[in-house]
Amino acid sequence: MTDGRLYYGAQGEALKAFDVRDGHGLRLLTLYGGVKLAVLTGRRADLVEQRCRELSIGHVVGQSRAKGDAIERIAADLAIPLAEAAFMGDDVNDLPALRKVALSCAPADAAPEVLAEVQWVSRRPAGRGAVRELCEVLLAAKVGWPPPEEEPKPVPQA
């Protein structure tokens, strides 16, 4: 959802840029695919939590150092077997989580160690449509791409 860069405002506040296409892809994935979403970040998650609220993603885990353990907790909380879970990560601290899910994914500009281990790599870099590309692939497998024109009933997030 972000390109990994941090910006700091004049008052020292941290800022991040989020790709609107990534956000729209996530909305489509929940609306049409019925997919449960969670966000796992290694940093303090205030900005990410705000963006996730906008996208109706209710499960956000910030300041996570042990991402392998965190993905297990998230899967349990959302009642998703890891054998049915996907995870996208871009750096070596994501490897423990990537190794535990059924579909491990990375953006095109991920760390070489990550690219060597994941099952699927986007053509786009992080923060520039990589998440959207994954959403399109998942939707194509579930309901077809582009999704049907009729508006589905919203699927509640756990």
Image (spheres, grey):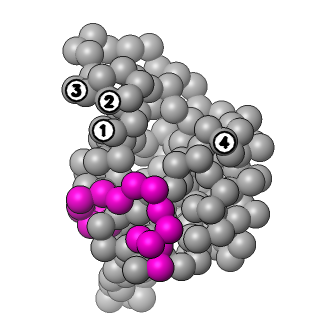
At a point 41% along the width and 25% down the height, the residue shown is 142
Mark 3 or 1, nearer chain start: 1
Q: Position of residue 115 (x, y in %)?
A: 41, 71
Residue linked to disc 3: 146
Q: Residues within 10 Å of mark 1 (few under 14, many from 20)?
A: many
User: Magenta stretch?
Assistant: 113-128
Specify whether residue 1 is in view. no
Labels 1 and 2 touching (C-beta < 8 A): yes
Mark 1 or 4, nearer chain start: 4
Q: Secondary structure at mark 2?
A: helix
Q: Is 53 situated above or below 136? A: below
Answer with left or right where residue 134 lies relative to residue 66. left
Residue linked to disc 4: 83
Labels 3 and 1 touching (C-beta < 8 A): no
Mark 3 or 4, nearer chain start: 4
Q: Which mark is residue 136?
A: 1
Cα gap from disc 2 to disc 3, whole angstroms: 7 Å
Cα gap from disc 3 to disc 1, whole angstroms: 8 Å
Chief SS of the magenta region? loop
Q: Quadrant of the C terminus?
A: top right
Q: Residues within 10 Å of mark 3 (few under 14, many from 20)?
A: few
Q: Secondary structure at mark 3?
A: loop
Cα gap from disc 1 to disc 4, whole angstroms: 20 Å
Q: Which mark is residue 140?
A: 2
Q: Choose mark 3 or mark 4, whichever is in front.
A: 4
The amino acid sitting under disc 1 is Glu
